[in-house]
Each structure stands twice: as structure tokens, then as C-alpha cells.
């Protein structure tokens, strides 16, 4: 990913053009500098935010609610979470977009709405895994360009997983199919066009099979844009430390 140029204003350094709302705070949690994305949420200019306490620099909706909901310029409702990363005596504040995660959580707990929502959002796919046959049954909404759908054997799925993440997925699969329960992991999978997709995978145990093992089902959601924004914010925090 190509990172935006770093802008330095006063004693703060951050990615001024980042889509992630970010602000540099001093030890008293006053704003040293804020980027345009943060300013846009408050209807102010970045320069007008300097010197304000964090609570004053947040959108009004955030004062008593964490996470909080806010209406964006296009009329869509976004759900944001405030994250603080210490950088020496200062801190980097970020407003992380949780909108898609909230939608996914609602789908997982409200199965009656799954079909309609999946028709509107093709980046979410549901699946079921049979540990006795080692076969996954996927919806067609998240096929990664490989045509992964219907019955897919375990080896085929593992072949497109990132080598660092495949063991994480295997550990969850083994635990849940033997003991039941639920889990959540971020798993990278290679799309057919070659790029890596970040998937938020939510696992749950299902019925106990005659073999004694548990069937497993879950929901996989493409969070690649959010993952890239998160990684960009981490890079900004590291550069602040160096600065």
C-alpha cells in the first residue's frame, strides 16, 4: 500500500490525507493537530481544533457514547470507536469505523435478516463446516474470485489462506469441532486476482454429529479497507514516535 506523505505541523506529525480521522494529543489530552478527516466530522477546520480538549474536539454524538453513531455527508449512518495509542508523553487519537462490524454482528444474531442483507452486501458470506467429511458449504457471496461455493474441501480452502493465518484458523477449527464454543479471528486469503483479502471470521459450534464432534458454522466478512486503514494508523503512530 502506498502511504500518503507525512505532514508536520508544529510538534505533531501525522498522515494529513488519511481517510482515518486522527488527532495528535498532548499529555493533557489537548489537540496539537488534527487531520482533515477528523475536522470533517465536526464541521470545523483542522486549525480550529488545535488547543481544544479531546472531548471538545469530538463530534457531539460522541460525548456520552462510545462507540457512537454519526450521519456522514452522504446520509449514511456510521458507527465509530475512539482509540488512543500512546506516543511518548503524547497520544494519537483515531476514530475507527465499526459500521460493517456492527452489521455483521447483527446478522450473526438475527438469522431472519441474513438472506436480505447478503443480497445487498456481497462482501459477507455464511458457511458451514462438517468435521467428519472435512467439507465446507459456502454461500456464493464471498467466493474470493475462485468460485468457492457449495461444497469445498478443507485443503482447497487452506490453499488460499495466508501461511501465517492458516494455523490460527486450524486451531479454532480443531477446538470448536471438538469442544464447541465460539471464536473470532482475522484471516487473510488470496483473491483470484492475486491481492490479499482480510476477512473477519466468526465461528460458532452447531449440532453434535454422530461421531461426537460438533458441526461448525459462521460468517466471513471482507474487512480489507478497514484493515488497511488500521495498518496505516499504526504506521502513523510509529512515525510519531520516531518524530
Image: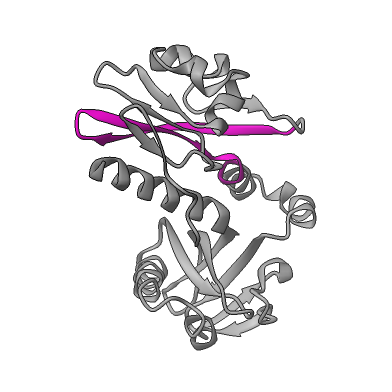
Between 180 and 230, the residue placed more toward the observer is 230
Please report the residue visible at 65 percent of the width from the left and 72 percent of the height from the top: 138
Q: Nearer the viewer, residue 136 or 118?
A: 118
Quarter holding residue 197:
bottom right
Instruction: Locate residue 190: give its quadrant.
Output: bottom right
Residue 4 on image: x %, y %: 50, 50
Look at the image and tell me in which quarter the C terminus lies: top left
SS majority, magenta = strand
User: Most extreme residue toward the left, as rendered?
Assistant: 88
Position in image of residue 17 (x %, y %): 54, 41
Determine whether 187 is above or below 158 in the image: above
Instruction: Give the residue displayed 55% in from the left and 61% down from the top.
Output: 218
Which residue is painted at 34% across and 71% down in the image? 171
Q: Residue at x 49, y 38 (%)?
A: 16
Q: Position of residue 78 (x, y in %)?
A: 63, 33
The colour scheme of the drawn protein is: one colour
Q: Is residue 84 magenta?
A: yes
**Residue 117, magenta (yes or no):** no
Q: Is residue 135 left or right of residue 85?
A: right
Q: Position of residue 139 (x, y in %)?
A: 69, 69
Q: Is residue 64 visible?
A: no
Does residue 200 sit above or below 149 in this rendering? above
Instruction: Give the vertical position of 76 relative to 227 (above or below).
Output: above
- Which segment did they paint magenta? 76-102
Residue 148: quadrant of the picture: bottom right
Is residue 46 rendered to the left or right of residue 182?
Answer: right
The residue closer to the viewer here, 21 or 15, is: 15
The answer to whether residue 97 is left or right of residue 185 is right
Amino acid at each position: 500500500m502506498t502511504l500518503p506523505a507525512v505532514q508536520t505541523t508544529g510538534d505533531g506529525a501525522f498522515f494529513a490525507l488519511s481517510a482515518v480521522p486522527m488527532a495528535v494529543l498532548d499529555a493533557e489530552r489537548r489537540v496539537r493537530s488534527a487531520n482533515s478527516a477528523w475536522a470533517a466530522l465536526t464541521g470545523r477546520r483542522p486549525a480550529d481544533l488545535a488547543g481544544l480538549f479531546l472531548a471538545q474536539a469530538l463530534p457531539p454524538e460522541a460525548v456520552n457514547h462510545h462507540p457512537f453513531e454519526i450521519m456522514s455527508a452522504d446520509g449514511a449512518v456510521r458507527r465509530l470507536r475512539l482509540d488512543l495509542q500512546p506516543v511518548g508523553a503524547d497520544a494519537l487519537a483515531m476514530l475507527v469505523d465499526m459500521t460493517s462490524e456492527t452489521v455483521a454482528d447483527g446478522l450473526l444474531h438475527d438469522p431472519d435478516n441474513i438472506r436480505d442483507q447478503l443480497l445487498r452486501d456481497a462482501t459477507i458470506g455464511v458457511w458451514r463446516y462438517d468435521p467428519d467429511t472435512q467439507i465446507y458449504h459456502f454461500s456464493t457471496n464471498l467466493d474470493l474470485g475462485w468460485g468457492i461455493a457449495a461444497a469445498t474441501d478443507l485443503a482447497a480452502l487452506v490453499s488460499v489462506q495466508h501461511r501465517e493465518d492458516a494455523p490460527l484458523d486450524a486451531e479454532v477449527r480443531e477446538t470448536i469441532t471438538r469442544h464447541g464454543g465460539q471464536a473470532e479471528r482475522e484471516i487473510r486469503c488470496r483473491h483470484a486476482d492475486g491481492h490479499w483479502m482480510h476477512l473477519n471470521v466468526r465461528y460458532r459450534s452447531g449440532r453434535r454429529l454422530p461421531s461426537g464432534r460438533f458441526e461448525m458454522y459462521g460468517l466471513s466478512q471482507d474487512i480489507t479497507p478497514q484493515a488497511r486503514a488500521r495498518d496505516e494508523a499504526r504506521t502513523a503512530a510509529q512515525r510519531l514516535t520516531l518524530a
